[in-house]
Amino acid sequence: MNGSFVITWNHLDGIACRSSYPTHPGVDFSDIKKHGERFRLFDDDGILYLSGYCVHDGGEDSIFAPLDFAMAEYGCTDIQYRDKNGIWESI
């Protein structure tokens, strides 16, 4: 499940989403949302595009999986996760 993520909100369109990436047999939206860490995706103007949850092992490949997707699909350039104090931080 490492590197799996779900998009739960499209902030540009103001709609809730239920999309999970990549798809794995036996791993679904609710599993990733339950076990994942919240993230936010922005463009280079600081506009919030998407948010969701990511399950990662702390490695760059898995922690940046949502940004890799959103960079190609939406032009996002920044991903944020909460730090140990709950403050959003770009990584």
Image (cartoon, helix red, strand yellow):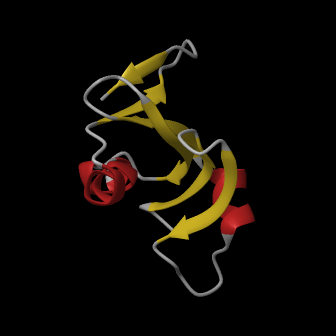
Where residue 11 sits: x, y (%)?
57, 38
Query: In percent of the image, x 26 and y 59: which residue is there?
Result: 72
Query: In percent of the image, x 32 and y 34: which residue is there?
Result: 43
* Residue ranking furthest to the front: 13
Q: Give residue 30's quadrant in the image.
A: bottom right
Where residue 58 sits: x, y (%)?
37, 45
Q: Is residue 71 placed above or below 77 in the rendered structure?
A: below
Q: Give residue 14's quadrant in the image.
A: top right
9 relative position to 42: left or right: right
Where residue 84 sits: x, y (%)?
52, 18
Q: Quadrant of the C terminus?
A: top left
Q: Is residue 48 placed above or below 18 in the rendered structure?
A: above
Q: Is residue 56 placed above or below 83 in the rendered structure?
A: below
8 relative position to 77: left or right: right
Q: Is residue 51 placed above or below 6 in the rendered structure?
A: above
Q: How many marks?
A: 0
Where residue 66 sits: x, y (%)?
40, 53
